[in-house]
Amino acid sequence: MAKILMVLGSLHKNGFQEQLAKEIEKQIGDRAEVSFLDYKDVPFMNQDIEFPAPASVEAAREAFKAADGVWFVTPVYNHTTSPLTLNLLDWLSRPLEVNVRETAVSNGVKVTFSSASAPGAYTEMFADVVKLANQIGMDVLDAPLFGHGLTGEWMTGELALDEAAHEAIEAQITAFLAKIAE
């Protein structure tokens, strides 16, 4: 059974990204084993502490290595992905050995992205983060990607997905599981 690692781009407890990720996990059902990455202790990327990397970075790297695919669910911050996500990608793109780029954990990792954010805001973010993921050697499922445009949900704090949203999520799940199986 495929192992999918969910990475939330927000630390907000029961926030929209977590709610969306849990809905994706629910829709995946028994087609894959889903786990969530806890990386709140990963420090800002800093070459002064790169070798040896902090234990929290090593734990994140090991989780990525153990996964067959990684699904990022991230909010939009200033038209791009969250600083939390960017920082993790920075660490993953760094080589495990000094000056040996090929040893970076990001190389070949199968990834996809989803978001719950302002209507349409995720489109530009997806283009940006897909470009970055490709740049650091990830194997990206860049379509279909699911973006949910938050509307009245801002007031309630509860994600409201309609049938069309569930169908779009299903299309992304199907495509990502096929990519993982390649």
Image (cartoon, rainbow, N blue to C red):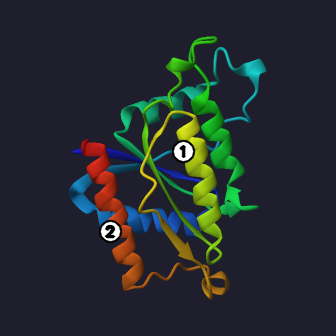
Q: Nearer the viewer, residue 137 or 55?
A: 137
Q: Nearer the viewer, residue 120 or 117?
A: 120
The residue under the point 64% across, 63% down is 124
Query: Within 10 Å of the Cα at label 2, are there few (<14), some (14-19), or many (20+) other Cα atoms?
Result: some
The residue under the point 72% across, 62% down is 79
Q: Which mark is residue 38?
A: 1
Type of residue at label 1? Asp
Q: Is residue 56 visible?
A: no
Name the N-terminal-most of marks 2 and 1.
1
Percent of width and height locating residue 161 = 45, 81
Query: Within 10 Å of the Cα at label 1, are there few (<14), some (14-19), or many (20+) other Cα atoms?
Result: some
The residue under the point 64% across, 56% down is 11
Percent of width and height locating residue 129 = 60, 50
Above or below for 112 versus 61: below
The residue under the point 61% across, 79% down is 157
Give the secondary structure at mark 1.
loop
Percent of width and height locating residue 56 = 60, 31
Between marks 2 and 1 in the image, the one whose residue lies nearer the viewer: 2
Above or below for 70 versus 114: above
| Quadrant position of the C terminus in the picture | top left
Q: Nearer the viewer, residue 46 or 42?
A: 46
Above or below for 166 versus 69: below
Q: Is residue 167 visible?
A: yes
Which residue bears the numbered disc 2? 170
Give the secondary structure at mark 2.
helix
- Distance from Cα at disc 2 to Cα at disc 1: 25 Å
Q: Nearer the viewer, residue 64 or 76?
A: 76
Percent of width and height locating residue 18 = 53, 63
Type of residue at label 2? Glu
| Quadrant position of the N terminus in the picture | top left
